[in-house]
Image (cartoon, rainbow, N blue to C red):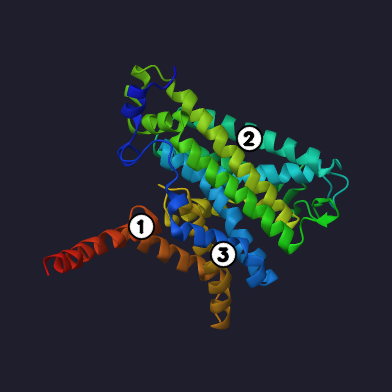
Amino acid sequence: MSLTHDARVAVRPADVAQRPARTWPEINNPAAWIVAIILLIMPLIASGFFLIEIFATTLILGIMALSLMFLAGYGGMVSLMQLTIAGFSAYMVAVFGVSGNANISLGWPWWLAVPMALALATAFGTLGGALAVRTEGIYTIMITLAIGAAFYYFTNQNWAIFNGHTGINTVATPHFWGVNWRADIPFYYVVLAVAALCYFAVEYISRAPFGLALQGVRDNPRRMAALGFNVNAHRVAAYAFASFVAALAGVLQVWNYRQISPGSVSVGACIDVLIIAVVGGITRPIGPFIGALIFVLLRTFALDFLVRLGLDGNRFRLLIGLGFLAIVFWSSDGVIGLWQRWRQSQRPRTDRQNGGRGHG
């Protein structure tokens, strides 16, 4: 059933109904342009460590969390298997491509291995989504978490394909046009380009007929079914798109570290992606990247700070947990919610000042 004008208005949630369907508010936002310019010139002002370990890692984790944000924010489905899908994609790149484990890797060139990895990871996530959409609420969370846990234990114990707990090391990265695309600056721009494409794709789909219908399914599935929409088909399609986004992050992740192991797809890491999305905010695509930056900064510098104090470096997760609780306590929409509340609190003050000048 095509989305008619009347149906489009009917399924549009309150926050979307207040603005035109196909607008790009960020384009006219000066702050967005400033951030974009800073990201583009980052190699000129940042060292290799900050460029890769901070900013590139932030973008990769942000892409993973973006896939979760798309499902949770627009579809009302909280999935804890997005990191698992990314890890599956990373493993497939290592298995089909070239690595130091010649007895496992098939030795395909990257331009064949990567599309195969993306296709298989998308299919894997779509199949998992087809199982998850048959449940709701806490049961969706549990079944996606179970898929993630099962994949972790399978990779940890399987030696024929995944090389067990050792993982697959020395994964080859692309070299073409005379450029080593894993060198710091080229790789940063590759990650930035993929992150931008995923961000704008989510922005566009959220305003497209499919995205509006998905938000209608989130708000009132019974009404959408009565209007003739296939509720489960929209949800499975959302999982397929989110799986492809997560798979892209997995390819970038394995190129970044040049290895993949079961520790990269552990249950704790799956929950970290949820924390990143929630801390940043799950109502707008920029939220996961904000949450990823906060997470990476805490993981990088809090770890060093705790070690210098003579404490266990793993306690940095305690700081992340406390920050997570504080943000969720003060705002149900993470940092974006706090920012919006602050801006709203400033408007009455500005209105009073403008009114005072007007009366004067």
Whether residue 277 appears in this view of the structure is no
In terms of sequence position, does the residue under pointer 2 or pointer 1 come before the other? 2
The residue singled out by tag 3 in the image is 38
**Classed neighbour count for the residue bearing mark 3: other residues with Cα under 10 Å, few (<14), some (14–19), many (≥20):** few
**Classed neighbour count for the residue bearing mark 1: other residues with Cα under 10 Å, few (<14), some (14–19), many (≥20):** some
Q: Is residue 154 above or below residue 308?
A: above
Considering depth in this image, is 278 or 8 the residue closer to the camera? 8
The residue singled out by tag 1 in the image is 328
Q: Amino acid at mark 1?
A: Val
Query: Residue at left 47%, top 29%?
Result: 210
Label 1 SS:
helix
* Image quadrant where one finds the N terminus: top left
- Residue 104 drawn at (x, y percent): 84, 44
Label 3 SS:
helix
Q: Is residue 61 above or below residue 131?
A: below
The residue singled out by tag 2 in the image is 122
Rounded to the nearest whole Å, what is the CA distance between mark 2 and mark 1?
31 Å
Nearer the viewer's eye, disc 3 or disc 1? Answer: 3
